[in-house]
Image (cartoon, rainbow, N blue to C red):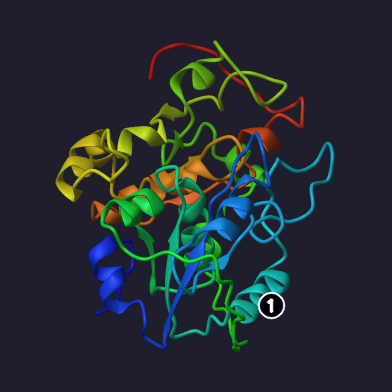
């Protein structure tokens, strides 16, 4: 059985020793970028490799041009996948400890490359611990593999495409940041506050239960019900601050059975590098 959106701790535990399964620890701290690596080195799911958001899941930042977490060069990312031992047929499971945003970033990037068998561990590392499953501090040496990407260009949307479609009824933008950041009331990270004109506010944390698990597919369908009122031909494009939590909304939508939306990976932190791009500030949706 292939897992393509979410996987439970029970199902991962049952398949953990499968030769064609690879687990990736994506824990990360925006305030302390070494926190996740340190946590991984202290304790992780047996056999897991570590993916650092800045080093492995992002490319170089170009001041004044890119956002805070630009997508890496495809060839570099493919080399990293091969180094981790991920082949085209591998079942990949990603996890973090924050409800899934960093794991969802890896999930989306693999989907972007055409890799279907990738899932996020529902409940993350805390959920694994709550089940009493084993952890280790032993870092296993991966066996390199060969990976051939089949990039799906429709999954990544550029700033230019967003600009061209701002007034187009066939495109709908979804903002995954907290509502106060969306509204321009409080901006703790980026130098400019607000949101892309016309975007709807869907904070990614609304996808989760109070204990950090994804809501059921039915609950997620209800959450995104408003999107179904639009034409089936409407292109949904998700964004956030830097292309991380937007992937969480995409994962939630796909898990709920909605079409796979696009992602403006540069997101708000890239959008504001060009003063000619318009911004909005308001408190409503």
Q: Is residue 156 above or below residue 116?
A: above
**Percent position (x, y) of residue 66?**
75, 43
Q: What residue does disc 1 label?
A: 79
Q: Quadrant of the N terminus?
A: bottom left
**Percent position (x, y) of residue 60?**
79, 53
Q: Is residue 185 above or below residue 231?
A: above
In front here: 34 or 162? 34
**Percent position (x, y) of residue 87?**
52, 85
Residue beneath the point at 59% across and 50% down: 36
**Percent position (x, y) of residue 252?**
33, 48
| Residue 122 visible here | no
| Residue 263 visible here | yes
Q: Quadrant of the C terminus?
A: top left
Residue beneath the point at 41% across and 88% down: 19
In front here: 257 or 138? 138
Residue beneath the point at 59% across and 88% down: 145
- Spot the residue most to the right: 63
């Amino acid at each position: 059985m292939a897992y393509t959106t979410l996987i439970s701790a029970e199902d991962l535990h049952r398949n953990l020793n499968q030769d064609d399964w690879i687990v990736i620890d994506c824990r990360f701290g925006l305030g302390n970028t070494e926190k996740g690596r340190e946590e991984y080195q202290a304790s992780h799911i047996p056999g897991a490799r570590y993916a650092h958001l800045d080093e492995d899941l992002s490319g170089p930042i170009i001041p004044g041009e890119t956002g805070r977490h630009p997508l890496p060069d495809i060839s570099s990312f493919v080399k990293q996948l091969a180094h981790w031992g991920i082949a085209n047929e591998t079942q990949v499971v990603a996890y973090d400890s924050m409800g899934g945003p960093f794991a969802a970033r890896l999930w989306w990037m693999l989907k972007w490359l055409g890799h279907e068998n990738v899932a996020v561990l529902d409940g993350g590392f805390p959920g694994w611990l709550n089940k009493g499953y084993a952890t280790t501090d032993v870092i296993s040496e991966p066996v390199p593999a060969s990976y051939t990407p089949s990039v799906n260009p429709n999954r990544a949307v550029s700033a230019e495409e967003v600009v061209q479609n701002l007034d187009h009824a066939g495109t709908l933008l979804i903002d995954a940041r907290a509502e106060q950041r969306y509204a321009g009331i409080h901006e703790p990270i980026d130098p400019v506050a607000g949101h892309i004109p016309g975007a709807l506010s869907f904070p990614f944390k609304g996808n989760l239960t109070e204990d950090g698990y994804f809501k059921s597919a039915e609950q997620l369908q209800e959450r995104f019900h408003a999107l179904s009122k639009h034409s089936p031909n409407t292109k949904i494009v998700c964004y956030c601050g830097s292309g991380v939590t937007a992937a969480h909304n995409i994962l939630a939508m796909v898990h709920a059975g909605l079409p796979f939306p696009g992602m403006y990976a540069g997101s708000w932190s890239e959008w504001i590098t060009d003063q000619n791009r318009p911004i909005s500030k308001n408190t409503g949706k």
